[in-house]
Image: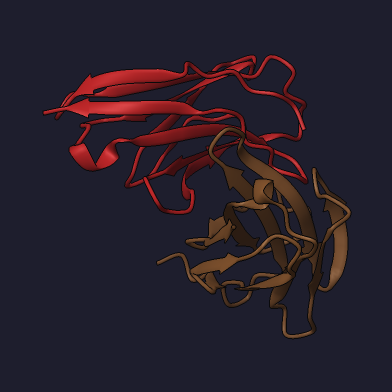
Amino acid sequence: DAKTTQPNSMESNEEEPVHLPCNHSTISGTDYIHWYRQLPSQGPEYVIHGLTSNVNNRMASLAIAEDRKSSTLILHRATLRDAAVYYCILRGNMLTFGGGTRLMVKP
Amino acid sequence: DSGVTQTPKHLITATGQRVTLRCSPRSGDLSVYWYQQSLDQGLQFLIHYYNGEERAKGNILERFSAQQFPDLHSELNLSSLELGDSALYFCASSVGRLSYNSPLHFGNGTRLTVT
């Protein structure tokens, strides 16, 4: 599975948008880009995924670069409940998780 | 609620012992994945089963084994336990074998403590 690179941590203010970046320069043509988040003491939770086009759902938006070598998860209005570790993964057979980005949300 | 059920939630056992962790996937999901999460190593992929067959192996120790039964539930067996095996063990399920377009749904894990 191809590797992804994310910042270790990010901070945001409550009710402001958050942009979580992910680099995946070795992505292959068949890899889907998946995002998961993990709250303390819980299993990872699916957030969103896409292949080439930008995607929106009730939780977030996913912006994918034209060359697919990077993507950005967008939380439109961060809440305290969004504080979690966010993982960007290239979906292959094993679905390997990297270190993720710890998002801290300040009231 | 992801629909994935893992039992037990907590398990405390001694070194050298053997335990079995159980996972029931979401209804309709044929793939089951096992992950180990320890404090210093993040989420490590162990093994993937699809419809009863092993499909991929990750960093799974020889002391560990798994299987998926005809009713699609899966068990992860850990033997000759060591202190370092203490971790959270997660199971995840998805619809297909190689359906990269389908998300994984995780259970809430089994916390194993080896004393």
Residue at point 55%, 17% (across, down): A65
Q: So how many labels did they put on this image?
A: 0
Q: Quadrant of residue A47?
A: top left
Of residues B94 and A100, which is closer to you in this image? A100
Residue B75 x %, y %: 72, 72
Palette colour of chain B: brown
A73 left or right, relative to A64: left
Residue A57 occupies quadrant: top left
Q: Nearer the viewer, residue A36 or A70?
A: A36
Percent coordinates x, y for residue A26 in the rendering: 74, 18
The N terminus of chain A appears in which quarter of the rendering? top right
| Whether residue B101 can be seen here | no
The color scheme shown is: by chain
Chain letter tied to red: A
- Kindly identify the residue that appears in the image at 57 percent across and 33 percent down: B40
Q: Nearer the viewer, residue B85 or A59?
A: B85
Query: Where in the figure is residue B102, as x and y percent of width and height?
Result: 62, 53
Left/right of residue B66 with respect to residue A89 in the rendered view:
right
Above or below, B49 against B102 in this view is below
**Residue A40 visible in the snapshot:** yes
> Which quadrant, please, contains the C terminus of chain A?
top left
Relative to residue A20, is residue B109 depicted above or below?
below
Residue that protrudes farthest toward the bottom in the picture: B71
The vertical placement of B80 against B29, above or below, is above
Q: Residue at x 42, y 53 (%)?
A: A42
Q: In the displayed image of the protein, which residue is found farthest to the left?
A: A107
- Give the left or right position of residue B104, taking residue A38 as reference: right
Instruction: Please give the name of the residue rendered at 53% of the width and 74% of the height, measured from the top-left corner.
Output: B8
Q: Position of residue A25 (x, y in %)?
A: 69, 14
